[in-house]
């Protein structure tokens, strides 16, 4: 009982027949190749619909006579002649299109989620609301695979004394992605192609809630295949062992049709992991006495310095118009809150960076996980806190999201993240430079790696491999960055001001977090603003926050999407962003 289908590579060529720039498919999901074939298909659909309506009317007219003759539950009275009303008691019709739901039902039904269906419910009747993933009908039987939030189960209909043939045909004609209500008996079974592999649903009633258009912009089955499956199909097609290779759904198509893409089981599960990261970050810091804050996103000056800032005219066209920008981070406000005696603060919120980069790891808007805290002696207190909440995130996902991880790994295989449940490895910057030189690495332009330069992306990834080989971990920290490559508010090292009391946190060789001890001394802060060519007057409220007694403090900021992508070993951060924003994309 295979729930998948495939199409030929020729079907995917752009010169093939399109409607409104999109391919069209029949009820079985097969590509319609030409305008003539499409006209024939639509004509047949119209003819079948009229025939079915006429037959339903005839049988409806006969219903009293048949019922009087003892026709039973499958009698013609059960064949719907129009929309089915189900407001309180179960309708006489066993199947059909429900009238629109307008908060007008009080049926008292108890609903089961597909993910909770198992052999433990064998013999029990359940109501399920789900999407039609696919259908297979032949003769007097039909199998419908239902999907709910990435979980799938197979439902079966057979013509019997209680299930009329019209009901079987009705189920077989359902378009993919249609939302249905289904009453069924749970039966033990072995259905390996569905996530709920130990059960099948024996259908008793079936109603459509919302019909999906036939011509989907992309097929869920295509978008759910792994790259290995696609490559294998290409090989088999080339050898003549398969009629055509599977279609590869490109990322642009996915993002242009994100609502459909979010229904793909792996993509849906990725979003749930993303939610979990935010949840465990928040709960871990609340346990440690942190206060959640919500800082402004429209501000007067750049919070991180540099050119990657979205500028705007605040209250444009009015007498109070002034320049502003979108916040590059909550950095300055986090520190100001600590100076306001909130002691320990964190925020989960949007961050804006005008990144002119189309790489697989950059977004112009992402979700920041930021924290700031008073320290007593060293920024390593903030590093200890980072170890605490990051391990909480990792452990929480591992303990409570195994089903989602399994779904994701089927389409995007990945190795489990290696980390320590206690203190993770911490390297000093000079040590990292020495490791890279010993491995024979140079800069992209062929020059030698300098002691005080920032690391290039390729160097970070190589360093990640070297750390993995030495410490058997994918999660580690690099401390004491050169002062020249850190923001103006970073505290320099006391023993060598060329270095700073700062750090980056890495996963699988990529940076996920920057942090540091912050400057809390006004003269030093003003000097470093001048050194970085940032007008201190533009940051007057921020600088003034440290004039009236300031606590030493430290913190950091993490990109949620990047954490999720690296935890799952994904190749592109856009897979972990709900509606990605980059230099080229503003919709949907």
Image: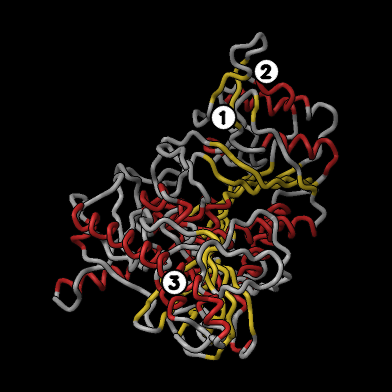
From the top left corner, tell me how far across and down residue 267 is, in percent.
Answer: 48, 61
Q: Which of the labelled discs sits on residue 230, or is there none?
A: none
Q: How many marks?
A: 3
- Answer with left or right where residue 433 lies relative to residue 110: left
- Give whichever of discs 3 and 2 has the lower sequence position: 3
| Marks 3/2: CA–CA distance | 72 Å
Residue placed under numbered mark 2 in the picture: 537
**Do the CB atoms of the residues marked 2 and 1 lie less than 8 Å apart?**
no
- Answer with left or right where residue 412 lies relative to residue 312: left
Residue placed under numbered mark 3 in the picture: 170
- Give whichever of discs 2 and 1 has the lower sequence position: 1
**Residue 567 at least partly seen:** no
- Give whichever of discs 3 and 1 has the lower sequence position: 3
Q: Is residue 442 above or below residue 183?
A: above
**Do the CB atoms of the residues marked 3 and 2 lie less than 8 Å apart?**
no
Residue at 58%, 85% (x, y): give it. Answer: 186
Quarter of the view holding residue 48: bottom left
Secondary structure under the numbered disc 3 in the rendered image: helix
Quarter of the view holding residue 527: top right
Label 1 neighbour load within 10 Å: few <14, some 14-19, many 20+ = some
Residue placed under numbered mark 1 in the picture: 305
Seen from the viewer's position, the closer of residues 277 and 13 is 13
**Residue 585 at least partly seen:** yes
Q: Nearer the viewer, mark 3 or mark 2?
A: 3
Residue at 34%, 81% (x, y): give it. Answer: 138
From the top left corner, tell me how far across and down residue 26 is, in percent.
Answer: 31, 63
Seen from the viewer's position, the closer of residues 497 and 553 is 553
Secondary structure under the numbered disc 2 in the rendered image: helix
Q: Is residue 98 above or below residue 364?
A: below
């Amino acid at each position: 009982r295979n729930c998948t289908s495939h199409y030929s590579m020729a079907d995917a060529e752009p010169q093939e027949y399109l409607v409104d720039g999109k391919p069209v498919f029949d009820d079985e999901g097969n590509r319609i190749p030409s305008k003539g074939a499409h006209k024939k298909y639509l004509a047949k659909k119209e003819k079948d619909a009229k025939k079915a309506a006429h037959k339903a009317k005839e049988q409806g007219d006969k219903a009293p006579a048949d019922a009087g003759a003892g026709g039973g539950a499958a009698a013609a009275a059960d064949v719907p002649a129009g929309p089915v009303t189900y407001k309180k008691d179960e309708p006489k019709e066993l199947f059909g299109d429900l009238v629109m739901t307008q908060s007008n039902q009080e049926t008292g039904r108890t609903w089961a989620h597909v993910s909770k269906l198992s052999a433990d419910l064998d013999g029990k009747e359940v109501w399920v609301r789900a999407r039609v993933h696919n259908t297979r009908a032949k003769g007097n039987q039909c199998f419908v695979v239902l999907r709910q939030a990435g979980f799938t189960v197979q439902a079966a209909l057979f013509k019997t004394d209680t299930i009329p043939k019209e009901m079987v045909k009705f189920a077989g004609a359902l378009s993919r992605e249609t939302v249905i209500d289904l009453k069924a008996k749970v039966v033990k079974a072995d259905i390996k192609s569905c996530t709920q592999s130990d059960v099948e649903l024996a259908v008793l009633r079936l109603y459509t809630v919302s019909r999906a258009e036939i011509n989907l912009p992309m097929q869920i089955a295509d978008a759910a295949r792994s790259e290995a499956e696609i490559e294998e199909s290409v090989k088999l097609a080339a050898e003549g062992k398969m009629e055509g290779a599977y279609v590869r759904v490109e990322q642009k198509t996915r993002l242009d049709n994100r609502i459909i893409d979010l229904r793909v089981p792996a993509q849906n599960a990725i979003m749930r992991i993303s939610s979990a990261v935010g949840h465990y970050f928040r709960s871990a810091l609340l346990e440690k006495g942190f206060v959640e804050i919500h800082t402004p996103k429209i501000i007067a000056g750049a919070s991180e310095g540099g050119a990657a800032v979205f500028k705007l005219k605040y209250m444009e066209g009015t007498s109070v118009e002034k320049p502003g920008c979108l916040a590059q981070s909550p950095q300055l406000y986090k520190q100001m809150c600590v100076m306001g005696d909130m002691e320990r603060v964190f925020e989960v919120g949007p961050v804006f960076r005008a990144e002119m980069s189309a790489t697989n790891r950059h977004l112009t808007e992402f979700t920041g996980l930021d924290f700031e805290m008073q320290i007593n002696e060293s920024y390593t207190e903030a590093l200890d806190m980072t170890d605490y909440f990051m391990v909480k995130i990792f452990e929480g996902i591992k303990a409570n999201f195994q089903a989602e991880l399994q779904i994701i790994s089927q389409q995007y295989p990945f190795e489990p993240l290696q980390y320590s449940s206690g203190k993770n490895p911490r390297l000093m910057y000079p040590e990292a430079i020495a490791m890279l030189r010993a491995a024979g690495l140079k800069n992209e332009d062929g020059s030698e790696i300098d002691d005080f330069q920032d690391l290039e992306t390729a160097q970070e990834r190589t360093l990640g491999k070297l750390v993995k080989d030495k410490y058997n971990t994918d999660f580690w920290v690099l401390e004491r960055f050169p002062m020249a490559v850190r923001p103006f508010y970073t505290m320099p090292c006391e023993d060598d001001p060329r270095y700073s009391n700062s750090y980056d946190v890495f996963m699988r060789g990529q940076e996920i977090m920057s942090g540091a001890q912050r400057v809390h001394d006004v003269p030093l802060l003003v000097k470093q603003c001048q050194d970085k060519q940032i007008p201190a007057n533009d940051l007057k409220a921020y600088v003034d926050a440290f004039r009236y007694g300031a606590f030493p403090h430290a913190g950091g900021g993490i990109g949620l999407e990047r954490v999720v992508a690296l935890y799952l070993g994904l190749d592109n951060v856009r897979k972990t962003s709900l509606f990605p924003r980059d230099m080229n994309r503003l919709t949907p």
